[in-house]
């Protein structure tokens, strides 16, 4: 068994089939994905730099938003450049080590985002439901602790799960029917029973997808009750602006993740799974800055102050 696993990786590469079934689509995909990737880089860097430069944005909400923006930058960069290279030329290979690194970081950053979105929903809960205690509840030191815990949970979980995935013997198979190294796609290469891996994947996904989603929905049900008791129109508008943006991001992230990870790898269409994965790795990170900054008075005010300062 061990020799089979070693032989599978001895040549040191995988072939990422990606969208090779649609050769005429590859050029169009290259252009569209490149545009989305550049939008992701510019939009998220804009949020990080603006939040750092403007003292009015030195609040827990924008601290966590900066973390989310940095996370999205890392997440897209872990897979999109490789995808663009594969779409542009005939070579669609990735080294064995590169595949391991890509799998590790995509799992780590995806898990971190699940936890970070829970933290952000708690911040909104504290702001709306406990306004008098908000500065105590969301003390800067506590905010930094929550951010560190989010990143540590993601990278620790990924170390365990990615090593468990790469220990599965691949029996000489090299063709990954996906555009990046993802757990379900790699498990399909195995010539042995992978039920233990599939069960582990579903358990870990339940812990880091379903539980965070339940916590987020619980926070927003409490926020909804508090909002219904509000009388001031301006207060309502501000709550709907910030909470609505966060709920939109949660929906764009969790719905595709649930489809991909909460069913066995053999249970979903491979082609459909590719396009869903393309959505949450390319489209969602590019939309997050627009969702959070569109019609956001705080951001518009920060941009105006920055331009006047210059």
Image: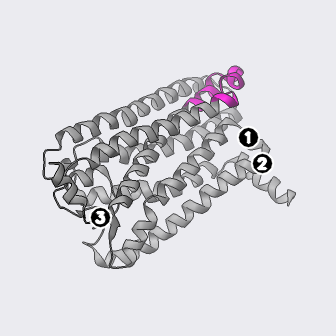
The rendered magenta stretch, by its main secondary structure, is classed as helix
Check whether the beta carbons of the residues at disc 2 and disc 1 lie within 8 A of each other: yes
| Front-most of residues 240 and 248 | 248
Numbered circle sitting on residue 218: none
First along the sequence among labels 2 and 3: 3
- Identify the image quadrant of the C terminus: bottom right
- Where is residue 39? Give x, y as percent: 56, 63
SS for dot 2: loop
| Point 23% across, 37% down: residue | 199
Q: Nearer the viewer, mark 1 or mark 3?
A: 3
Q: Residue 239, how many percent across, how many down?
A: 63, 35
Report crowding for label 3: few under 14, some 14 to 19, many 20 or more residues within 10 A (C-alpha): some
Q: What is the quadrant of residue 245 in the picture?
A: top right
Question: Separation of disc 2 and disc 3 at Cα?
Answer: 48 Å
- In the rendered image, residue 193, in percent from the top left (x then y), is placed at 13, 44
C-alpha separation, residue under disc 2 versus residue under disc 1: 7 Å
Q: Which residue is mark 2?
A: 54
Q: How is the image coloured?
A: one colour
Query: Looking at the image, which is closer to me, 263 or 226?
Result: 263
Q: Which stretch is magenta? A: 122-142
Q: Is residue 225 magenta?
A: no
Pointer 2 local density, CA inside 10 Å: few below 14, some 14–19, many at least 20: some
Q: Is residue 295 in view from this perspective?
A: yes
Numbered mark located on residue 12 in the image? 3
Q: Secondary structure at mark 1?
A: loop
The answer to whether one can see residue 117 in this image is no
Residue on which disc 1 sits:
58
> What element does badge 3 sit on?
loop
How much space separates mark 1 and mark 3, taking CA atoms? 47 Å
């Amino acid at each position: 068994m061990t020799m089979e696993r070693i032989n599978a990786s001895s040549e040191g590469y995988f072939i990422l089939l990606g969208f090779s079934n649609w050769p005429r689509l590859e050029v169009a995909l290259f252009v569209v994905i490149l545009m989305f990737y550049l939008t992701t880089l510019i939009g998220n860097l804009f949020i990080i730099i603006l939040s750092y430069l403007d003292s009015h944005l030195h609040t827990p909400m924008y601290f966590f938003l900066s973390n989310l923006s940095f996370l999205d930058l890392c997440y897209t960069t872990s897979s999109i450049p490789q995808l663009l290279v594969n779409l542009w030329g005939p070579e669609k290979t990735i080294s064995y080590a590169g595949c391991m690194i890509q799998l590790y970081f995509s799992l780590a950053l995806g898990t971190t985002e699940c936890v970070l979105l829970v933290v952000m929903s708690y911040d909104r809960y504290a702001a709306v439901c406990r306004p008098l205690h908000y500065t105590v509840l969301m003390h800067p030191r506590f905010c930094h602790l929550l951010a560190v815990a989010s990143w540590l949970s993601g990278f620790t979980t990924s170390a365990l799960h990615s090593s468990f995935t790469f220990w599965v013997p691949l029996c000489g198979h090299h063709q990954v029917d996906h555009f990046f190294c993802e757990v379900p796609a790699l498990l399909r290469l195995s010539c042995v029973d992978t039920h233990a891996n599939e069960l582990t994947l579903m358990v870990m996904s339940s812990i880091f997808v379903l539980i965070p989603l339940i916590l987020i929905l619980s926070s927003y049900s409490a926020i909804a009750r508090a909002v219904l008791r509000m009388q001031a129109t301006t207060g309502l508008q501000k709550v709907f602006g910030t909470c609505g943006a966060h709920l939109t991001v949660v929906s764009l992230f969790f719905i595709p993740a649930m489809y991909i990870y909460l069913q066995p790898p053999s249970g979903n269409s491979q082609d459909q799974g590719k396009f869903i994965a393309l959505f949450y790795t390319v489209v969602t990170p590019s939309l997050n800055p627009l969702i959070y900054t569109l019609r956001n008075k705080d951001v518009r005010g920060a941009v105006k102050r920055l331009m006047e300062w210059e």
